[in-house]
Image (cartoon, rainbow, N blue to C red):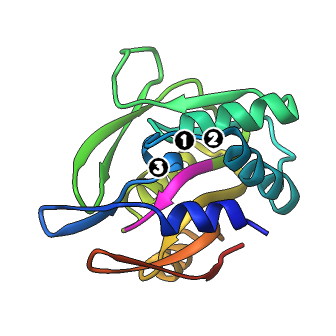
């Protein structure tokens, strides 16, 4: 299971950004190319392990976009994007996202109390993105049916799950040892 995903990780180049090692992968960066078979393999597993009994899929800009879109096409579920741009719409909520290599505001629109949502994202590194988004969704009063990331860099997930009172699923757990990537197992 997930053989294409594992193979693609092993082939991923790693770049250093301000003392932070960042791996370049088709599903996290759209580079070198997202091949249909890889995306289908990932979506097959997501459909089998996640609770998709929800009103819609929600994700953050930008690499969650192809994941949410692909899942929407397979399941018929609509999706919403959390954007890095403010539209100034009525009820818009702003959250500060702090990652291992950047900081920016994210904007949530058209998410209401009582909405049942499935959150998907590409990678969990420090947890900054997920923490900001999940806290905002909880404050709004949404019901999270499930939360999934494709890649989990080991180190921070368990403490964040405890803090937020949720479980975060991942497909692959990775250990970044400088410029080296080690697959340490399946997440789920």
Q: Position of residue 154 (x, y in %)?
A: 46, 80
Q: Secondary structure at mark 2?
A: loop
Asked whether 131 or 138 is in front, the reply is 131
132 lies above or below 108: below
**Would you call the spot at circle 1 few (<14 residues within 10 Å), some (14-19), or many (20 or more)?**
many
107 lies above or below 64: above
The range drawn in magenta is: 120-125
Position of 184 compared to 113: left or right?
left
Position of 33 compared to 49: left or right?
left
Q: Are marks 2 and 1 in contact (CB under 8 Å)?
A: no
Q: Position of residue 186 (x, y in %)?
A: 67, 77
Give the residue number, with chain letter if any, for mark 1: 64
Q: Nearer the viewer, mark 3 or mark 2?
A: 2
Q: Is residue 169 visible?
A: no
Give the residue number, with chain letter if any, for mark 3: 28
Give the residue number, with chain letter if any, for mark 2: 35
Asked whether 110 or 61 is in front, the reply is 61
Position of 91 compared to 96: left or right?
right
């Amino acid at each position: 299971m997930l053989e294409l995903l594992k193979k693609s990780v092993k082939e991923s180049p790693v770049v250093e950004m301000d003392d932070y090692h960042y791996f370049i992968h088709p599903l996290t960066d759209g580079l070198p190319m997202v091949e249909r078979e890889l995306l289908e393999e990932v979506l097959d597993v997501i459909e089998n392990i996640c609770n998709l009994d929800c009103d819609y899929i929600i994700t953050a800009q930008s690499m969650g976009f192809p994941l949410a879109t692909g899942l929407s096409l397979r399941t018929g579920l609509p999706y919403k994007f959390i954007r890095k741009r403010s539209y100034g719409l009525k009820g818009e909520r702003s959250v500060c996202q702090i990652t291992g290599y950047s900081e920016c505001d994210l904007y949530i629109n058209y998410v209401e109390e009582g909405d049942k949502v499935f959150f998907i994202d590409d990678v969990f590194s420090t947890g900054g993105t997920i923490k900001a988004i999940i806290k905002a969704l909880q404050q709004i009063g949404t019901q999270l049916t499930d939360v999934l990331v494709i890649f989990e860099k080991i180190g921070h997930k368990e403490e964040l799950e405890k803090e937020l009172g949720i479980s975060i699923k991942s497909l692959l757990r990775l250990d970044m040892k400088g410029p080296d990537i080690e697959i340490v197992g399946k997440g789920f």
